Amino acid sequence: MKYILGFRQYLHSEKSYQDLEQIILGQPEHFPPTEGFLTIVAICGDNPREFLEEKGLRSKVAFYDYAPWEENAKRVADVFTRSVHKTERVQIIHYNENPLGLTYPLELLVYIARGLNAEHLAVSDSDFQLSYSEIRRVYDHHIATADPDEIVITYPRRQPRSLDTEKYPINRWAMEDLENMYIYFLSDLKVLNSKPDFQSGLSITTRAANKILNFDNVGSWIGNLHMAIQLIRNKGRLDKDFVVKTNYQHESTINFDVQCAKIDQLYRYYMIPLSNIVELAIEHPDKYLMEDWTAGKSKQEIVETIKKIEAMNNRYLEEKRKERLEKE
């Protein structure tokens, strides 16, 4: 297969089951294998076997249950690429019963793309914040403009930047901006000029890009950010201006604890504390923060928003430190 479309999914809720069914039923229309596409769903959480049978979907998928092994992503990818079959069907890989974060399924799909020598790999969240048709539009754009043997990564630009905010004690748009600042400082500050939408829920990489990616010792939640940093550092081309329409995000695997864990993992891997990022964001909000949430706000309001994130993150880290001490 020349082109892989990979979904990463935490199967645990009614909405996630609906999304899985939509992926399977929509594949023939939007990503037909006759056009060179292979669709893979990397699943953690519930085993989908019974659901597939109850819904009459079993004949539409090839199912691989690797969860009992609890193996690393490279090992699972190696086994899958040697045993892949019925490629006209959606490939369902159940890799673990527990949620392992966002890095594992990304790494798994990158290794699979390498093993199958795919020209391009798209990795999408499974919540359909981007519709099937929008994902296909971006993929067609990427295929038309990216040489598979050139290091290229495509990040579409959401319009609007839809985020689930239910039960969130912080401004998620601001939090995303702070996370993206790590990419700017660790790769190329010139990227700042256009403020790419690094966390759109969809990335597409070329074969050359996939060959250089390395996720060793990368935290469980920061694989996407680390991928962008690696590719920009390696002088890859960043395709960042293709605009996509988004659906309202009703559910997200990213809760407040996960957001704080991402910041902690970025610090542990790159040794840049959030306080440094916050200081720069406050000093130069126009330079580092996106207008979709700062427009119309005073400097003081922006500062208060950023400081609230820093304070809550510090409390989170202190609580985690106490938990570790209690276990010792």
Image (spheres, helix red, strand yellow):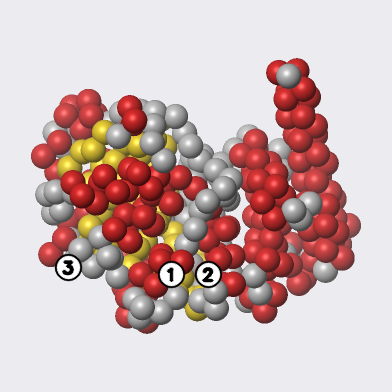
Q: Quadrant of residue 292?
A: bottom right
Instruction: Find disc 3 in the rendering and name its residue.
Output: 35
Give the amino acid type for the residue marked by disc 3 in the picture: Glu
- Crowding at dot 3, Cα within 10 Å, few <14 / some 14-19 / many 20+, comes out as few
CB under 8 Å between discs 1 and 2: yes
Instruction: Find disc 2 in the rendering and name its residue.
Output: 231
Which residue is painted at 79% across and 52% down in the image? 273
Mark closest to the chain's N terminus, 3 or 1: 3
**Spatial separation of the CA atoms under disc 3 and disc 1:** 22 Å
**Spatial separation of the CA atoms under disc 1 and disc 2:** 7 Å
Give the amino acid type for the residue marked by disc 2 in the picture: Leu
CB under 8 Å between discs 3 and 2: no
Mark closest to the chain's N terminus, 3 or 2: 3
Instruction: Find disc 1 in the rendering and name its residue.
Output: 209
Whether residue 290 is visible: no
Q: In which quarter of the image is residue 195?
A: bottom right
Residue 275, horizontal then vertical, whole percent: 83, 52
* Mark 2 residue element: helix
- Crowding at dot 1, Cα within 10 Å, few <14 / some 14-19 / many 20+, comes out as many
**Spatial separation of the CA atoms under disc 3 and disc 2:** 28 Å
Tell whether 302 sits left or right of 214.
Answer: right
Between 143 and 220, the residue placed more toward the observer is 220
* Mark 3 residue element: helix
Considering the image in quadrants, where does the N terminus appear? bottom left
